């Protein structure tokens, strides 16, 4: 059975393709999830892709990933910059955690330049547009598929 990777997207990422396309691009989250799922199959992995605008829901899914999922790829959206609850949940997960930001948060407003999730992430991708998700999955495969 191929190993499962959980892909989590946080608030407002459901509006990908419509929201500030000059920053986040024109691809929809559905397009991105389909692309990542195809690549997962190619790489010998399975993907569970989820999105929520609610912090507690993201915490619940991270807890569910314990014992089920081999790794987590997460774009926490704005919760990156505020959520100790998501950091704590990720700290309870044993496998690799890769953090994705579509935009380069380091060249944006000061409040976006700190991520609580980065205190746990094994790797961070920022500013590669939606390609960041497939790049993160390739890294996940090199960590998980031996
Ligand atoms: C997405 C968001 O929704 C913002 O709140 C973050 C991140 C940046 C991204 O670049 O994917 O600040």
Image (spheres, grey):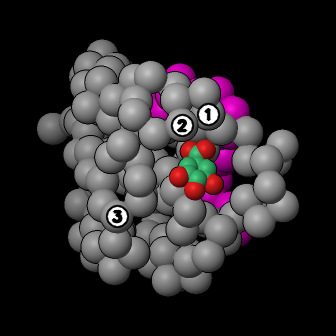
Q: Residues within 10 Å of mark 1 (few under 14, many from 20)?
A: few
In which quadrant is the N terminus drawn? Answer: top left
Q: What is the x, y in percent for residue 35?
A: 32, 21
**Which of the 4 quarters of the picture holds residue 132?**
top right
Q: Nearer the viewer, mark 3 or mark 2?
A: 2
Please tell me the numbered disc located at residue 129. none
- In depth, the one of 8 and 82 nearer the eye is 82
User: Which quadrant holds the C terminus?
Assistant: top left
State if disc 2 and disc 3 touch (CB < 8 Å): no
Residues packed near mark 3 inside 10 Å, few (<14), some (14 to 19) or many (20 plus): some
Comparing 139 with 119, the one in front is 119
Picture coordinates of residue 143, whole percent (x, y): 52, 39
Q: Residues within 10 Å of mark 2 (few under 14, many from 20)?
A: few
| Magenta stretch contains residue 81 | no
- Distance between the alpha carbons at the discs numbered 1 and 2: 6 Å
- Quickly name the residue at label 2: 20
The magenta segment: 118-138
- Answer yes or no: do the residues labelled 3 and 1 have beta carbons within 8 Å? no
According to the picture, the residue beneath numbered tag 1 turns out to be 23
Image marks 1 and 2: residues in contact by CB distance under 8 Å: yes
Q: Position of residue 128 (x, y in %)?
A: 64, 27
Q: Quadrant of residue 30?
A: top left
Whether disc 1's CB lies below 8 Å from ligand 1 is answered yes
Q: Which residue is at a point 23% across and 46% down the rendered structure image?
A: 48
Q: Secondary structure at mark 1?
A: helix
In this view of the protein, which residue sits in the foreground, 52 or 125? 52
Q: Which mark is residue 53?
A: 3
């Amino acid at each position: 059975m191929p190993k499962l990777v959980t892909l989590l997207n946080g608030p407002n990422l459901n509006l990908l393709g419509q929201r500030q396309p000059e920053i986040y691009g024109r691809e929809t989250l559905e397009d991105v999830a389909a692309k990542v799922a195809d690549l997962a199959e190619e790489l010998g992995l399975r993907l569970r892709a989820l999105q929520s605008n609610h912090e507690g829901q993201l915490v619940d899914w991270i807890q569910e990933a314990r014992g089920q999922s081999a790794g987590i790829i997460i774009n926490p959206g704005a919760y990156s910059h505020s959520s100790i609850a998501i950091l704590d949940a990720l700290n309870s997960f044993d496998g690799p955690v890769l953090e994705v930001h579509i935009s380069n948060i380091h060249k944006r407003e000061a409040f976006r330049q700190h991520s609580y999730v980065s205190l746990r992430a094994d790797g961070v991708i920022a500013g590669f547009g939606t390609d960041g998700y497939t790049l993160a999955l390739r890294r996940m495969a090199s960590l998980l598929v031996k």
